[in-house]
Image (spheres, grey):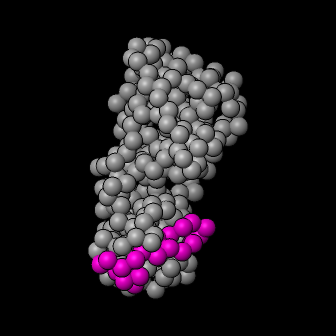
Amino acid sequence: MPELPEVETIRRGLEKYLPGRRIAQVEVRLPKLLRNCDPQTLNEDLQGKEFLQVRRVGKILILDCEDWSLLVRLGMTGQLTFRDLHLPDQNSFTTHAITGLQRAQGQFSPDKHTHIIIRCQDETEVLYRDIRQFGKWYLYSTQDLPQAPELQALGPDPFQPSYTLAYLSAQLAKSRRPIKVVLMDQGVVCGLGNIYADEALFIAAIAPQRAANSLNSEEVGRLYQAILQVLRQGIANRGTTFSDYRDADGLRGGNAHYLQVYGRAGQPCYRCGAILQKMTLGGRTTAWCPHCQH
């Protein structure tokens, strides 16, 4: 599932294209993706509206228009890309040997996995492509958006002022859950998932199975900084692509080359040479170094 760096990379890409463009039509080919409206209502409410800005809270994209906002959760395989009908498409899909999921590189035209198309008046489009169909779309009026349950349930975004060392310390102190599980709880800190939680814990030298309330103040301080470090690195490298993630231009992210532990169980630790171990925490596979992380 795309995490904060991937969603932020998509946001920055769409922010280059969408503000100032007006919506001509919204075509919904898979209605089950819409969670609080129907295709007809979505199309009627957004027709003629101008895109104002593209925002992000945690892993949620927010496309603000006149009077309305679209909240988009990408799920596991969601791709949100911009298409200019005046430019050539790159319809060269490759197939992953294990999952069978298809990936394009660059702008591509709609196919059977393209489930929502936002057409603009200047012959450009926003395409939502999702093979596993786990994505979720919500429509809120500008007035109702601040009370949206999807936003109310979130803890602070690591790049918001409310994410402070004092806040993180207080949250960890009251939980006996494994620290890895707490970090992936979107009600504690929103935006972290499996990849960046593993990476932050490695940098902070903290074993993922430790109880959150067992961390001392020095360890919490290291973790607080490590979270910001791995997220900034992920954004700088335009996100992590293993299979399906693409940015708004349809391009792969480059952060996979910089990961220290995630997905590397059974291989030597880059820091000490010990063999990285794996375990399951919160239903997710976790990679860690038994020598470097305590």
Number of numbered discs present? 0
Q: In this rendering, does residue 22 appear at all?
A: no
Q: Residue at x 43, y 56 (%)?
A: 157
* Residue 69 higher or lower than 165, as above or below: above
Q: For residue 82, which quarter of the picture?
A: top left
The reply, left or right, for residue 218 in relation to residue 52 is left
Q: Position of residue 163 (x, y in %)?
A: 39, 63
Q: Position of residue 50 (x, y in %)?
A: 46, 22
Q: Residue at x 39, y 41 (%)?
A: 252
Q: Residue at x 55, y 24 (%)?
A: 110
Q: In this rendering, does residue 54 appear at all?
A: yes
User: In this picture, which residue range is highlighted in magenta?
Assistant: 272-294
The reply, left or right, for residue 41 in relation to residue 206 is right
Q: Residue at x 70, y 32 (%)?
A: 31
Between 86 and 164, the residue placed more toward the observer is 86
* Residue 48 higher or lower than 154, as above or below: above
Between 157 and 96, the residue placed more toward the observer is 96
* Residue 37 higher or lower than 88, as above or below: below
Between 84 and 108, the residue placed more toward the observer is 108
Q: For residue 68, which quarter of the picture?
A: top right
Q: Position of residue 219 (x, y in %)?
A: 35, 80
> Where's the C terminus, which quadrant?
bottom left
* Residue 223 higher or lower than 237, as above or below: below
